[in-house]
Amino acid sequence: MLNVQIVLFDGFDLLDAIAPYEVFCAAAMNAENALNVELVTAEGPRSVPSGINGLRIEASGRLDPERAGIILVPGASGDVEGDGPDSVPAILGRAMDTELTGMIEQALQHKDRIVATVCGGSLVLAMGGLLEGRPAVTNHLGMALLSATGAVPVSARVVDDGNLVTGGGVTSGLDVALYLVERELGPRIAHAVEQLFEYERRGTVWKDTGIKPNVNKSVTSDEPNAAVNKTAMIPTPNSQHSKSIQASVFDGDWETTIATPVGKMEVKLSILTRDDLIQGTATQGDETIEFMNPVLQDNKLAWSLRITKPMRLNLKFEVVADGDHMVGIAKAGLLPASKLTGNRVT
């Protein structure tokens, strides 16, 4: 029997979870119960509030990453532009802070476990460092953030990377589930479900197989989105330093606070101008990272960082200094710009 576990978390998007649930249940009816579907959480049985007016759905069990079959992770429903506790990034961040990330990582280590995502579900995995180097898709609003985590964004409705199957926007949950039914139970069962729902699966499922398109492809092709990758590309270590025509007003050690959607980050910045070169490091906890591509222009200093805590992200910083006070922003893809404030301590 094929086991399907659909993961719920506080603030999940209803359609992301319920559309696949109905598809899998319909497949079970047409396949003489060759498939079992269960709503689960990382914590166990409980009532789970969705992001749509707090509507609650009962989860009957705890996610079991050792159970062969399919694990499906939906996205979140919330404010897509704000940075408050009800914003999509904040909801996804709270989901990532549960045991869910570790459970999914455990499941991905097995070839007989298929991890599927719908919409922002792929961002939960990506921000947890689970999609680095793997082709994936998410809602179009999150593609830049997906790239910023080190995943390879593909502009397709559904992306099949073996034991990882990801879907795009909210309604792609139907397409992800129908594709998995066809892949695991056969096209006749998938066709029967399509007839029942009066819905035909949309788009081509992208796989890294077959003849590659011409390299002069457009941005809208179904190959990994080169334009997105370039904008979020991590500079090489050889480009860490940038020439400065004058002594930097940023030299010194700074204690800064970054107000992110998932909480405040205390970061120590150490900046030094030497031989007309700007260099710097950022330290949070036990992690110290060198600035990449620091550029000083007029009174503004900009640089990039690749962080791994509290999540894997490529961040871009822009700050200005007024005496011993620093203000600026840090930004990664879809996430709203986070305010940075700090003071020079030495």
Image: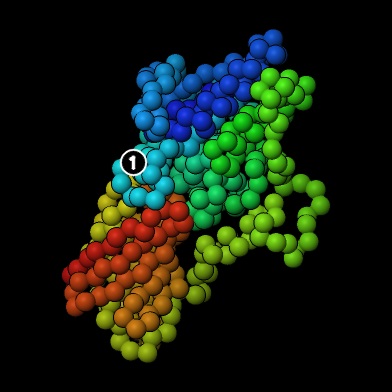
Which image quadrant: the C terminus? bottom left
Q: Residue at x 40, y 70 (%)?
A: 303
Residue under the point 75% across and 24% down: 191
Element type where label 1 sits in the image = loop
Q: Please name the residue that numbered disc 1 is placed on.
A: 86
Residue 261 visible to the viewer: yes
Nearer to us in this view, 122 or 235: 122
Q: In this rendering, is residue 250 above or below 259?
A: below
Task: Single out the residue that lies furthest toward the bottom.
Answer: 245
Category of crowding for the residue at label 1, using alpha-carbon neighbours closer than 10 angstroms: few (below 14), some (14–19), many (at least 20): some
**Could you tell me residue 91's position as x and y percent?**
38, 40
The picture quadrant where one finds residue 19 is top right
Residue 327 horizontal side relative to residue 315, left or right:
left
x and y, in percent, of residue 328 in the image: 30, 67
| 147 shown above or below 93 | below
Q: How many marks?
A: 1
With 142 as the anchor, is 85 left or right in this view? left
| Residue at 60% in and 46% down | 136
The relative height of residue 91 versus residue 18 in the rendered view (above or below) is below
Please name whichever residue, 139 or 225, is drawn nearer the observer in this view of the structure: 139
**Which corner quadrant holds the N terminus?**
top right
* Farthest residue, direction top: 32
